C-alpha cells in the first residue's frame, strides 16, 4: 500500500491496523545526541488515547510507547527511530455484523473498490486508531522544534454551533473538550453529550496558532509551506476543510484591506496585520501561522441507517462498538503532530538550502 510515508529529510513511515497486534512508526532523519525517552513520547500519546473522558470512545488502551531502535543510553543515535504501540482492547466481534456491509460515511467501499479486500474490524488502516503512530512521531518532532522556540497551539474553536470567543491558550488542557474558552467548554460538552444520547455525532472546527516560526520556511512552487501543511492536515481522515489566515473570508475583502503592510518590529521585519496567516507566496513571514480545520461528524453511530452490502443489496445497519461522538478533543494532538512533522522537515530543508 503506497502513501504510508510522509516528509523528505525528516521522513516518517507508519504501519498497523485498528485491530491488529500493534501500530508503529519508523522515523528517518532524527538528529543524533538528542535526549529522548519513552516518557517524552508518552505525554502526547496520553492526550490522544481513547477512554480519557466521558465524551470520547470508552475503548481502553494504555497506548504505551516502546522505543525499538535509534536510542542508546537516553540519546538518539542518528539511526532510524522505531516506536511501537500495542493494541490491547480491540473487540473485533463488535464488527461481525458489518463484515460484508459498506458502512455509511466510512472508507469500506472505497478500500474494497481499490484493493478488492478490506479489514472490516474497525476500519483497519482507515481507522482513526492509525493516528497513534503519527502522534508518537510528532512528539519527537516537537522536541526538535522546542530547541528553535517554535510553539504549536491547537484547540477546539467550535462544536456544532457552539463557538469559542474569549480565547486563552492557557486553558486548552484544562477542559476535556480542549477549547481555549473556559466558558464555552461546558456548552460544548453538553452539546456532545446531547448528540450521543440521540445515537448521533457532531462535527467541529479546530484552530491552530504557530508561534516563533522564523521567516523563510517553505519552497516554491509545489512545496509551499501552506500546501505541505494542508497535505499533512488533510491526511487526517476526519479533516474536510482547511483555511489559512482569513481563509474564505478574503473573498469579502478588497486588496487594500487584505494586503498585510510591512513594518519594523524592533530590528525585524513584520506586518501590521496578518490576514495571510503568516505565509506569503508559500514562505513564512515570521508572523504567527494561523490555520483552521473543519472536522466531519464521526461516521460510526448506533442509529439505524440504510446502505448496501457487497452483493449490492440494500440492507439496514447499526454500527456497534465504542466510538467518539465528536472527534475534536482527540484530533487536537494529531493535528499538532502533523504540523510538527511538517515544520521540522521544512527547517531541515531550509538548512540544506542555505549551507
Image: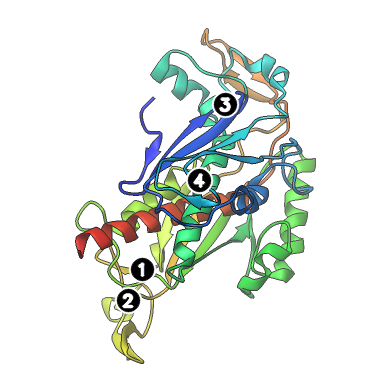
Whether 145 is drawn above or below 43: the answer is below
Q: Residue at x 43, y 73 (%)?
A: 212
Q: CA distance from mark 3 to mark 1?
A: 38 Å
Relative to 93, 253 lies left or right: left
Relative to 310, 173 lies left or right: right
Which numbered circle lies on residue 250?
Answer: 1
Which numbered circle lies on residue 202?
Answer: none
| N-term mark: 4 or 1 | 4
Q: Residue at x 51, y 11 (%)?
A: 312
Whether 352 is drawn above or below 98: the answer is below
Under circle 1, the secondary element is helix
| Disc nearest the viewer among 3 and 1 | 3
Under circle 2, the secondary element is helix
- Whether residue 202 appears in this view of the structure is no
Residue closest to the eye, 56 or 14 = 14
Extreme residue toward the top, this view:
311
Under circle 4, the secondary element is strand
Q: Which residue is mark 3?
A: 123
- Badge 3, how many Cα within 10 Å: few under 14, some, many 20+? many
Q: CA distance from mark 2 to mark 3?
A: 43 Å
Q: Which residue is mark 2?
A: 258
Residue closest to the eye, 347 or 83 = 83
* Quadrant in the picture for residue 198: top right
Q: Which residue is mark 4?
A: 71
Please state, as top left, top right, bottom left or bottom right, where the N terminus lies in the image. top left
Q: CA distance from mark 4 to mark 2?
A: 48 Å
| N-term mark: 4 or 2 | 4
Number of marks in picture: 4
Horizontal and vertical percent for residue 279?
Answer: 32, 68
Please state, as top left, top right, bottom left or bottom right, where the C terminus lies in the image. bottom left
| N-term mark: 3 or 4 | 4
Horizontal and vertical percent for residue 187?
Answer: 75, 61
Amino acid at each position: 500500500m503506497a502513501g504510508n510515508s510522509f516528509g523528505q529529510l525528516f521522513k516518517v513511515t507508519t504501519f498497523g491496523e485498528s485491530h491488529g497486534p500493534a501500530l508503529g512508526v519508523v522515523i528517518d532523519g532524527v538528529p543524533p545526541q538528542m535526549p529522548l525517552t519513552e516518557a517524552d513520547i508518552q505525554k502526547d500519546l496520553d492526550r490522544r488515547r481513547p477512554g480519557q473522558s466521558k465524551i470520547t470512545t470508552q475503548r481502553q488502551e494504555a497506548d504505551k510507547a516502546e522505543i525499538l531502535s535509534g536510542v542508546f543510553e537516553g540519546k538518539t543515535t542518528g539511526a532510524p527511530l522505531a516506536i511501537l504501540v500495542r493494541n490491547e482492547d480491540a473487540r473485533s466481534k463488535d464488527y461481525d455484523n458489518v463484515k460484508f456491509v459498506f458502512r455509511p460515511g466510512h472508507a469500506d467501499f472505497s478500500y474494497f473498490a481499490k484493493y478488492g479486500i478490506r479489514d472490516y474490524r474497525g476500519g483497519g488502516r482507515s481507522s482513526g486508531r492509525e493516528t497513534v503512530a503519527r502522534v508518537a512521531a510528532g512528539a519527537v518532532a516537537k522536541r526538535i522544534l522546542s530547541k528553535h522556540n517554535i510553539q504549536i497551539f491547537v484547540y477546539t474553536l467550535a462544536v456544532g454551533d457552539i463557538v469559542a470567543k474569549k480565547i486563552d491558550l492557557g486553558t486548552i488542557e484544562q477542559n476535556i473538550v480542549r477549547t481555549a474558552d473556559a466558558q464555552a467548554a461546558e456548552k460544548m460538552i453538553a452539546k456532545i453529550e446531547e448528540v450521543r444520547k440521540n445515537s448521533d455525532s457532531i462535527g467541529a472546527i479546530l484552530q491552530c496558532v504557530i508561534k516563533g516560526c522564523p521567516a523563510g520556511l517553505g519552497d516554491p512552487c509545489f512545496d509551499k509551506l501552506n500546501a505541505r501543511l494542508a497535505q499533512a492536515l488533510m491526511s487526517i481522515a476526519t479533516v474536510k476543510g482547511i483555511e489559512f489566515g482569513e481563509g474564505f473570508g478574503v473573498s469579502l475583502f478588497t486588496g487594500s484591506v487584505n494586503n498585510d503592510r510591512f513594518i519594523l518590529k524592533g530590528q525585524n521585519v513584520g506586518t501590521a496585520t496578518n490576514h495571510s496567516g503568516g505565509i506569503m507566496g508559500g514562505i513564512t513571514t515570521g508572523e504567527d501561522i494561523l490555520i483552521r480545520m473543519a472536522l466531519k461528524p464521526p461516521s460510526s453511530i448506533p442509529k439505524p441507517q440504510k446502505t448496501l452490502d457487497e452483493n449490492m443489496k440494500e440492507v439496514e445497519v447499526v454500527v456497534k462498538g465504542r466510538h467518539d461522538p465528536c472527534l475534536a478533543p482527540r484530533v487536537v494532538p494529531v493535528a499538532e503532530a502533523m504540523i510538527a512533522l511538517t515544520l521540522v522537515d521544512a527547517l531541515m530543508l531550509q538548512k540544506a538550502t542555505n549551507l
